Image (spheres, rainbow, N blue to C red):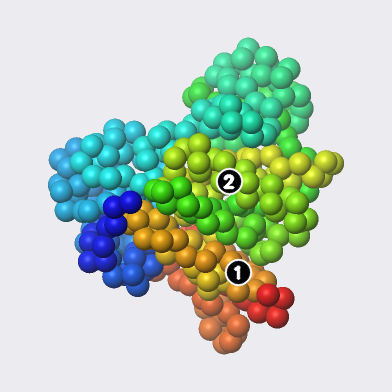
Amino acid sequence: MVMILPGSVIGILGGGQLGRMLAAAAGQLGYKCHIYSPDENSPAFDLAAYHTVADYNDIEALTAFAAKIDVATYEFENIPAAAAQLLAEHKVLRPSWHALEVSQDRVVEKDFLNEHGIATAAYQAFETKDELKAALAITGRPAIAKTRRFGYDGKGQATVKSKANFANALKVMGGVPSILEAFVGFDREISAIVARSENGDVAAFPISENSHVNHVLDETNVPAAISPTVMATAQVIATKIANALDYVGVLAVEMFVTDITGEVVVNEIAPRVHNSGHWTIEGAHTSQFEQHIRAICGLPLGDPSARGAVRMKNLLGKDILNIEEYLADPGAHFHHYGKCHPVDGRKMGHVTWIDPKTD
Ligand code: AMP
């Protein structure tokens, strides 16, 4: 395994809070980061040694970026294929372009999972009204229509229960390639986050339980209130996915635990560090951000175990203005992403509490 040594430059595609927290972890390990983002106000720029403001389709800027870095990674999966491929031609890209390709399209992702014997909701691709009708025959009602690509935090989604929903779903999808998924009656939503190194070592974080408000992550709690068997199953599934992708880096897998059988069904794969893993910064012996840097640089993986019971709360929009309340709480680890304007629903920061007693 080739080690990329401290002092080297890690190139990160994407300049959001995930890039910011990756840059902080990389700095601690002695690396410098170069962030590439089209947004001149990217939160990750503040903590990185270098940055490039350019479009993901700018071949000249991408080539110049590749020349200045030692290894490339990404914090955002909706990167144009050509950009990731171009980088991979010049420098080692971890995780690989293939991992991006699989996770960018919900149909490709579900096909991949099913081919590897991993359960998902029943699904069918559609674009037209007739195809949606045919898809409903496969999924039954209720079902959820989603755009195949570029969806996040519930955007580009519509529930189909009745005739009225049917017309609305077609309108929301806007004629782009879409997927219809059977509605999974779930008891809990969980995340399995694993890190895998080039030599195949895997470190699995404890399973977290997620609650959403308006399709956006609100809270993550660790440990999840599920049986040890379900926890083990979730970790095995995430490890299987990482191995099948010959993955290098941190991988997050969002799953449903069904209410009837307690079966684990995969919702989606994120080939990157994940919001439901922010608790690991203070709550685990090695954070997901440090673990990602270790994995992509060929360093040994750290201990992913939890330091206790952990609760992470996202601060959306104006929630961030309660900063004084959190700073006055000695148990609260407060994180501000450095975004200037608290737009409604925007992820502005998070807070983590640890209860070491239950360790
Ligand atoms: P996604 O963008 O796929 O992560 O979906 C956002 C949220 O919608 C999930 O966290 C679930 O709460 C809900 N959801 C998505 N797909 C399904 C499904 N097939 N069955 C039930 N709930 C779903």
Give the number of the disc on residue 65: none
- The residue nearer to you, when weighing 202 against 75, is 202
Position of residue 291 measured from the top left corner of the image (x, y, whole percent): 44, 61
Quadrant placement of the C terminus = bottom right
Type of amino acid under label 1: Ala
Q: Position of residue 3 (x, y in %)?
A: 29, 57
The correct choice, above or below, for 89 with respect to 218 in the image is above
Q: Are marks 2 and 1 in contact (CB under 8 Å)?
A: no
Q: Please tell me which residue is depicted at 36% across the width and 60% down the height of the picture.
A: 299
Q: Which residue appears at 76% of the width and 24% of the height?
A: 140
- The span from disc 2 to disc 1 (Cα, nearest Å) is 18 Å
For the point 47% across and 33% down, which residue is it? 102
Vertical arrangement, residue 106 with respect to residue 42, above or below:
above
Query: Which residue position is annotated with label 2?
Result: 238
Amino acid at the residue labelled 2? Ala
The residue positioned farthest toward the right in the image shown: 260
**Identity of the residue drawn at 60% across and 69% down:** 306
Any part of residue 189 in sight: no
Q: Is residue 22 visible?
A: yes
Foreground of the two, 149 or 203: 203
Give SS at disc 2.
helix
Q: Secondary structure at mark 1?
A: loop
Give the residue pinned by disc 1.
306
In primary-sequence order, the first of circles 2 and 1 is: 2
